[in-house]
Image: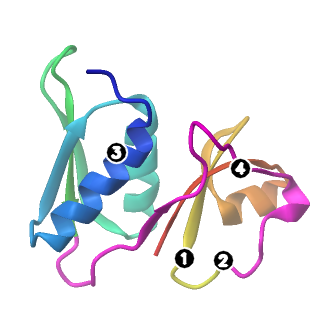
Amino acid sequence: MPLTDPIGDFLTRMRNAQHGGRTDCRAQWSKILQAMCDLMKKQGYLESVSAEGDDAHKEIVVVFKTDRPALLLKRISSPGGRKYVGAGEIRSHLHGSTMAILSTSSGLITHKEARSKNIGGEILCTVS
């Protein structure tokens, strides 16, 4: 059965895995999920990200950091309600340990990168 919101499903899988005491999470692989996880790993939220399997059965495997509390993942934009922001509308109170992931014309980037490049886009989710 096809998913209507693969990003929301993936964030829910990650939340459920962490609340269940698991150290890793698996989901069906896609380019956007790989890019999101690479950003989270680069920012220090995840231990490792890898892809396993072949074309039709490819999965993304995320390993959580054990030395930090569970991630707070919130889906902002959804298929039924997209949330777009201009470069000047990216809220500055997203600071410290909170990161927003935006889909822009330059690909997926964090809110800090979007502000520095002066570009807007769709806010996919926040991670803290």
- At label 3, which amino acid type do we have? Asp
Query: Looking at the image, which residue is at 86% across and 52% down?
Result: 86
> How much space separates mark 3 and mark 1, taking CA atoms?
21 Å
Query: Looking at the image, which residue is at 19% across and 25% down?
Result: 58
Q: Residue 44: horizontal and vertical position, in percent?
A: 38, 70
User: Are there few (<14), some (14-19), or many (20+) residues within 10 Å of tag 3?
Assistant: some
- At label 2, which amino acid type do we have? Leu
Q: Earlier in the sequence, mark 3 or mark 4?
A: 3
Q: Give above or below for 20 relative to 110.
A: below
Q: Which residue is mark 3?
A: 9
Are the residues tagged 2 and 4 within 8 Å (C-beta)?
A: no
> How much space separates mark 3 and mark 4, taking CA atoms?
18 Å
Q: Residue 63: horizontal and vertical position, in percent?
A: 18, 59
Q: Please tell me the numbered disc located at residue 59.
A: none
Please provide the residue range marked out in magenta. 65-94
User: Are there few (<14), some (14-19), or many (20+) residues within 10 Å of tag 2?
Assistant: some
Instruction: Kindly state the secondary structure of the residue where label 4 is placed.
Output: loop
Q: Residue 111: horizontal and vertical position, in percent?
A: 67, 62
Q: Residue 38: horizontal and vertical position, in percent?
A: 40, 50
